[in-house]
């Protein structure tokens, strides 16, 4: 596993999204309960960017289809319930999901040292 510096600790704010790259891997950083958390920047639904997603109570919402994920564990909390931020009726969420099952958001281990945030990448 490779340890890569990705941000200054001061740049990672509570409930705010910071888009960064670890090598060629695009990530999103935020802080939850004082801890820096890193997730993949693409939603597992259709691979669209979540850089404009909102973080509330430790969960990021995909700005495209409303899927929500825990930013520290990657757990899927809600799957495809909106279109570009507009809620849809429950019966249409199956159509919107296009047959894809709820999936977690990949997370990356972070550490902080000397005012810097590092992430571990596999391989």
Image: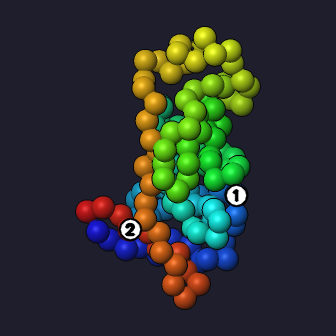
Q: How is the image coloured?
A: rainbow
Badge 2 crowding class, 10 Å Cα cut-off, few under 14, some 14 to 19, many 20 or more, is: some
**Residue 56 locus on image (x, y percent):** 71, 49
- The local secondary structure at tag 2 comes to strand
> Which quadrant: the C terminus?
bottom left
**Residue 87 locus on image (x, y percent):** 72, 24
**Residue 83 locus on image (x, y percent):** 66, 24
Looking at the image, residue 110 lies above or below residue 106:
below
Query: Does the image show residue 20?
Result: no
**Residue 104 locus on image (x, y percent):** 45, 41
- Residue at screen point 32% across, 71% down: 2
Left/right placement of residue 4 relative to residue 2 reads: right
Query: Which residue has dot 2 on it?
Result: 120
Left/right placement of residue 108 relative to residue 1 reads: right
Badge 1 crowding class, 10 Å Cα cut-off, few under 14, some 14 to 19, many 20 or more, is: some
- Residue at screen point 38% across, 68% down: 120
Residue 9 location, quadrant: bottom right
Tell me which label, 1 or 2, sits earlier in the chain: 1
Residue situated in front as seen by the camera: 41 or 67: 67
Looking at the image, residue 81 lies above or below residue 118:
above
User: What is the C-alpha distance between the residues marked 1 and 2?
Assistant: 22 Å
- Residue at screen point 48% across, 48% down: 74
- The local secondary structure at tag 1 comes to loop
> Which quadrant: the N terminus?
bottom left
Residue situated in front as seen by the camera: 28 or 90: 90
Q: Which mark is residue 15?
A: 1
Residue found farthest to the left: 123
């Amino acid at each position: 596993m490779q340890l890569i510096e990705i941000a200054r600790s001061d740049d990672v704010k509570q409930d705010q999204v910071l888009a960064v790259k670890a090598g060629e891997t695009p990530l999103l950083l935020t802080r939850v309960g004082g801890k820096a958390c890193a997730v993949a920047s693409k939603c597992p639904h259709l691979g669209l960017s979540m850089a404009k997603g909102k973080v509330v109570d430790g969960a990021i919402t995909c700005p495209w289809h409303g899927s929500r994920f825990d930013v520290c564990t990657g757990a899927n909390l809600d799957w495809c319930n909106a279109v570009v931020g507009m809620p849809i009726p429950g019966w249409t969420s199956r159509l919107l999901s296009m047959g894809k099952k709820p999936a977690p958001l990949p997370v990356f281990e972070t550490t902080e040292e000397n005012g810097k945030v590092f992430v571990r990448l596999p391989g």
